[in-house]
Image: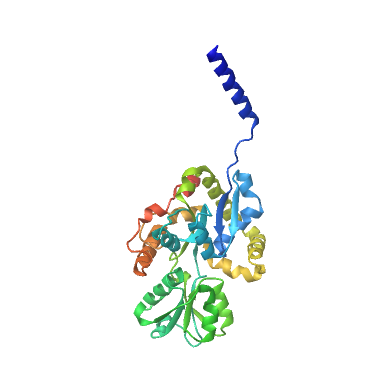
Amino acid sequence: MKFARHATRALSALALLATLPFAKAEPLKIGYSDWPGWIAWEIGIKKGWFADAGVEVDFQWMDYVASMDAYVAGQLDAVCMTNGDALAIGGTGKPSVGILINDYSNGNDMLVAAPGISSVKELKGKKIGVEEGFVAHLLALKALESAGLSADDVEWVNVPTNETPQVLASGAVDAIAAWQPNSGQALKTVSGSTPVFTSSDAPGIIYDLLYVSSESLEARKSDWLKVTKVWYQIVEYINDEDNLDEALEILSARVALSPEEYEPFFQGTKILSLRLANKVWEDNNSLRSVYGSSRVVDQFNVDQGVYEANLNIESYLDPSFTKALAE
């Protein structure tokens, strides 16, 4: 009789549970900001492709640095970052794992010189305004290296990236290093200014990825695979020329520009197809590999005192999501 009473209670409890709604998973919170390869997420959002894939995602639009701060504070499950900035954040206390490569900068990051300066060599002994320790600083160093110059051959002026156009216009510096839209604004603001070196001169120096916290990745791996699948649906859509006009309308609306104004920004970003992404995931020491690029920027971070010792690059990158879709 005692067993029967326990069995009856157990069955009653199961019956009660059957009438209750299952706990719904929280939306994946992703921070994204003003960069063409990240604004591209808008296409999936507007077209409802995440819901179609069976994953609920809360994309939160914010300034780039603010998005990284929110991620560090635990307010986001993932954030869109450059490979260098992901290492900087990891090296100072908040590691993450890059699960998909959105793009590499292909001209949007620039070293813009004042009127009368037409080459990197002419910057010897002059002032360069740049936000020290960020990717534009790395690009400027790469530019100097290409011209046979060193960091000691110029005077560095630490300037927030969003202020670089005004600083160049003021005459306080002879060149600035910045990414779009700031680099383009500098060219518009200062008549006669020239991009003497861009990321298209060093393809792969800057990769842009979706970085996920290890906790979220472990708990919701299947959902992150769905997010990755939607990303490549977006890429296929973008790469179809028949969709270009609509794609530019969606992208430009996010930053309140016309499609015509936005198209040059889009063209300066190499968004990677699944096939190209798989090649970039190959581990070698060239800039054509996200591993090789990350090793370069890791050394840059150490040299700049962002953190003291080189990081384990492999722990910050996980190609398995992309590779699973390619099989």
Observer able to see residue 149: no
Residue 127 locus on image (x, y percent): 43, 83
Above or below for 309 versus 217: below
Above or below for 55 versus 2: below
Q: Quadrant of residue 306?
A: bottom left
Number of marks in picture:
0
Above or below for 257 versus 9: below
Observer able to see residue 109: yes
Specify whether 268 is left or right of 92. right
- Determine the residue located farthest toward the bottom in the rendered image: 116
Q: Quadrant of residue 121?
A: bottom left
- Depth check: 153 or 307 in front? 307
- Determine the residue located farthest toward the top in the rendered image: 1
At 61% from the left and 48% from the top, the residue drawn is 50
Residue 63 locus on image (x, y percent): 56, 65
Quarter that holds the N terminus: top right
At 52% from the left and 42% from the top, the residue drawn is 222
Q: Quadrant of residue 235?
A: bottom right
- Determine the residue located farthest toward the front in the rendered image: 2
Specify whether 15 is left or right of 217. right
- Depth check: 311 or 122 in front? 311
Model colouring: rainbow
Residue 103 locus on image (x, y percent): 50, 60
